[in-house]
Image (cartoon, grey):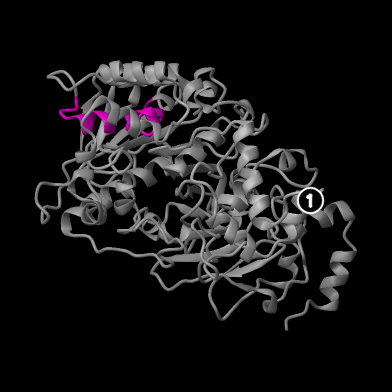
Amino acid sequence: MFLPTTAAVLALTLLPSALAADVDARGLFGPLTSKLGPVVELGYAAYAGNATLPGLTFYGGIPYIQPPVGNLRFAPPQRLNEIPNIFLSNADVVDARNWGPLCIQQPAVMGIGSEDCVTLNIWKPSNATSKSKLPVYVYIHGGGHYYNSAQGFPANDWVARSSGGLIAVALQYRLGLLGFLSGSDIVKSSTAGPNNGLLDQRAGLEWIQRNIAAFGGDPTKVTIGGQSSGGGSVALHLTAYGGEKNPPFRAAVIESPGLDPFYTTVHSEQCYGNVTKAVGCDGETDTVACLRKASIGAIISAVNNKPSTCKYEPIIDGDYIPDITSKMFTAGKFSKVPILAGHTAQDGSIFVGAPATINTDADIVTSILKRYPALTTATTTAMLQTYPPASATTPWTTQWERAMYAYMESELACWDYYIGNVSGKPAFNYRWDAPDPNLLASRGAYVGAAHTAELFYLYDGTNSGPSASVAQPVFTPFNPAQDALARQAVGWWSSFARSLDPNTYAVAGSPKWEAASQGGFMVADLAASNTTTTPNSRMTDRTTDYPKRCAWWRSVADDLRL
């Protein structure tokens, strides 16, 4: 065990207290080392990383809050003790060469996932030091806020293909019942609260502000991004507290942003009652204390035995989430930062059902009510007028496509356009036209470039991350055309994170992005042949009917509760 010399300790104790607080005391004793891998010192802790890939080092499973277990179950995230410890020795270096555990999923399986799962994964250029001040990209995974994990979204290629110009981070946060349980007992509790999964993400961003410099990152150059509920989370961070002038990020990437309609207080109470009954806490004076004492087996049983009408999602809390998100954006109550945002070409295809099930107007309404059960008859009637039967002037040619467009544009394909055009900051829009071959194989060719399709390309052929049903990441090798588009896309996304412009560090030969304010968007698409290595990506002008349909959805925000 390495111990500081008596002289070194005496030298520190002789420093004035104010100066001692600012001194890099570890410098008196020399850097920590480990046989496991390169060490990053944070003052209060030190981590050994995985340097098996050329030119980059991975640090996984790094906790950024106190473990949310025991009396901290259902509590807002609690900050770690980050007081510097000058007596850290080589024996204190933590092995961070692999991922941390999954968070408990929904549906849940005993033995897969953990409560103590709230961690960060960091990829850095191996030669980056605390003086490098590199831009940072932080990814928030999707999965409806109730499944998935950071493990399925490795960003080593982002770092490697940026020639060491980027730090990449993937966040894990509490999911489902453990992350988003709400009800009056939770809201009134002095030690618990709603929206903890979202607040975990915020705590992670604040940890990054305090600590990313040690990995070579610049806390003033953080871009946050996410897909589906991860993209919806990004939107909620933009509207946090009614819009912050100085949020803990400088830019945002929003991919197919998805949030479920905000529950009413009555609905939240019904779902909370289902949990307390399932766990055996109904009738208790302090249901929160009872739920905290429940075994993880009882919690898993509650996760798996909930009504289909109960999801555990963010709620309007009057603080971090002041109001319905669409209304916040319309009122300008959000952080104005540069945006890269878009959606897939058939973003609603996997949600509305197979084409054979959508033949009438009533079928279309039924497919939409699956997501928005509280829509009034007046709204669904107006929706059918906004999305009229197929004609020479509509982008849809069948009843199924009509339903798919309505579902897609209700949020997934309209928020990205709208957010990117109201901030007054640089904004870039895209549409992803390349399908995920795994989705085509499992769901059918009709799904096209479905929801999550871009993740296959951005994250090495991912299956969108492990869950209780697929506990390990699964990756599918690229053919030459897919590999070319993946390289182009990673170049664009990482360029935006580095310079706030997807063009600056784009792959040679890539088409140039125009700003969203010019009325166009980038179409990301494969070449016609699997062996062709020049993607068919191109800029396209936006048609006038699309913004009109998006404006109509915003006009019924109260009915949608989005």
Q: Residue furthest bottom?
A: 1
Question: What are the residue bounds of the magenta stretch?
Answer: 395-417
Whether residue 542 is situated above or below residue 110 in the rendered picture: above
Quarter of the figure with the N terminus: bottom right
* Amino acid type, mark 1: Glu
The majority secondary structure of the magenta stretch comes to helix
Q: Quadrant of residue 31?
A: bottom right
Other-residue count near label 1 (Cα within 10 Å), few / some / many at <14 / 14–19 / ≥20: few
Asked if residue 222 lies in the magenta stretch, the reply is no
In-image side of 235 versus 75 (left or right): left
Determine whether 387 is above or below 62 in the image: above
Residue 145, position as x, y percentages in the image: 51, 47
Using the image as rendered, state which of residue 422 and residue 314 is in the foreground. Answer: 314
| Residue 264 spot, x, y in % from top left | 59, 31
Q: Nearer the viewer, residue 357 or 176?
A: 357
Q: Which residue is mark 1?
A: 284
- Residue 248, position in %: x, y? 60, 40
Residue at horizontal 22 percent and vertical 37 percent from the top: 511
Q: Residue at x 18, y 48 (%)?
A: 445
